[in-house]
Image: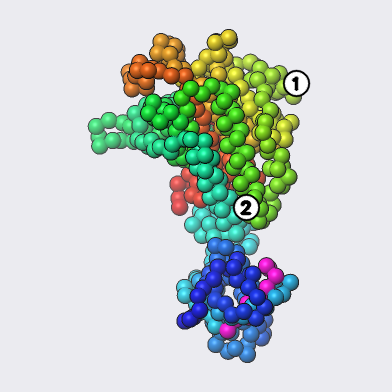
Amino acid sequence: MIPIEFRAISDALSSEEGERIAIRGWVYRKREFKDKIFLVIRDSSGIIQCLARKDNQKAFEEARKATIESSVEVEGCIKKDPRAPGGCELKVDELKIVGLAAPFPITKSAVDASSDFLLDVRHLWIRSRRMTAILKVRDTVFRSIHDFFRSRGFYEVQAPMFVTAAVEGGASLFKVDYFGRRDVYLTQSSQFYLEVLIYSLERVYTIAPSFRAEKSRTRRHLTEFWHAEAEAAWMDLNELMRLEEDLICHIVSTVLSERAEELGLLGRNVKALELVEPPFPRLAYDEAIEILQEKGFDIQWGDDLGSDEERALTMDFEKPVFIYGYPEKCKAFYHKPDPSRPEITLSADLLAPEGYGEIIGGGERIENLDVLLDKIKKFGLDPKDYEWYLDLRRYGTVPHSGFGLGTDRLVMWICGLQHIREAVPFPRDIRKVYP
Ligand code: ATP
Ligand code: MG
């Protein structure tokens, strides 16, 4: 219909008074009066208010027919109006309905009614301004992870999703029937493959799904999550923590500068994010246990920290905080014992502040063959399941460290969300695999 080029709505909003423009998008809001109809149109870049007046009969009729979420093309002139969102309004000359929408199931009252309903219609809820804002922050987070690792000389690699052995313990493995020949599993972490790859590339990273059969329902566990993992030859725990710190600071500052509008729309307190600067406080596991006992937690040295404990610990800090030196039994078998205190490991988790808790787990890996073999047996595992992993310690073994960052938990914290499901476009947990 329209001979002039379509513009993004964000671009249209900065047009001159009286300028003729065309936009296309979806009807986001509609208000009807006797002689005028306001349509707020949204596209991926923003929203603009359009006014159809009765004196333009044809456009007025189309505007009357246009339902919420109908896709439309609109042409008209820009009028500055401080009352309109974005400070200007489009006076409609022509309006074409491209796809007339049936009555949209997500109404204002439905949004308040139940989040279960919004999960069932996630394929439609994705269009909401809230989800759009979250997805844009998520995009910035993923891009800044790539930018960071490339700037630090890491190579991006890919690991398989079908694997034959557990990285994080058998309880959370998803089993898959592999052509009736054998059982394989969906990967819980790419770590072991990254460890292989450091023997050629030295510093590697990947961003990939990890799968864990998490049976308990929490606000921070999904069964399929996106895992940013890095592994580096010759790196010790101190260097690793500095790398993690720099990564998190880079991501947060990029989001703050590029996604201020989205954070505002989400009602995020950005002051809390502005405090995220190196160095992050480091707390020994031993001290963490003492603090928790003082706070009244029934916890003993040797117990793992759950989400309640992590929440209580992070409430005292304004920045993300490292907890280092976890006892051997809190961590998977490959964690390297501290030579000066073999009952603890050279490991560190990074906990996000404001109660969010663990976003990164990492540490030094065991590089000695015999130590690794002993650990595998001590953990009740079968060395036969780890043959190729053990080979890495047979042929030119090297001290090395690595970590895994849960990107969905990171997005959850940066956006200030209540539940991890909101941080992912199509969340999977014990109850939800649809849509
Ligand atoms: P948790 O104790 O919270 O279950 P974990 O110790 O099992 O975490 P790691 O195995 O260290 O976690 O995994 C590295 C990172 O991956 C975690 O710090 C977290 O950010 C993320 N992660 C782990 N499991 C999940 C999950 N089920 N859903 C979303 N993210 C996860
Ligand atoms: Mg876990």
Where residue 435 appears, as percent x and y from the top left, is: 45, 52
Residue in the foreground of this view, choosing between 116 and 416: 416
Categorize mark 2 by other alpha carbons within 10 Å: few (<14), some (14-19), many (20+): some
- State the extent of the magenta-drawn residues as a range: 85-93
* Quarter of the view holding residue 283: top right
- Ligand 1 within 8 Å of the CB at mark 2: no
Q: Is residue 247 left or right of residue 17?
A: left
Q: Which residue is mark 1?
A: 294
Residue in the foreground of this view, choosing between 308 and 416: 416
Q: Which residue is mark 2?
A: 259
Residue in the foreground of this view, choosing between 86 and 197: 197
Task: Judge whether 426 appears above or below 351 on screen.
Answer: below
Where residue 378 appears, as percent x and y from the top left, is: 45, 12
**Mark 2 element type:** loop
Say whether disc 1 or disc 2 marks the residue closer to the N-terminus. 2
Color scheme of the displayed model: rainbow
Q: Residue at x 49, y 57 (%)?
A: 123
Residue 362 seen in the current view = yes
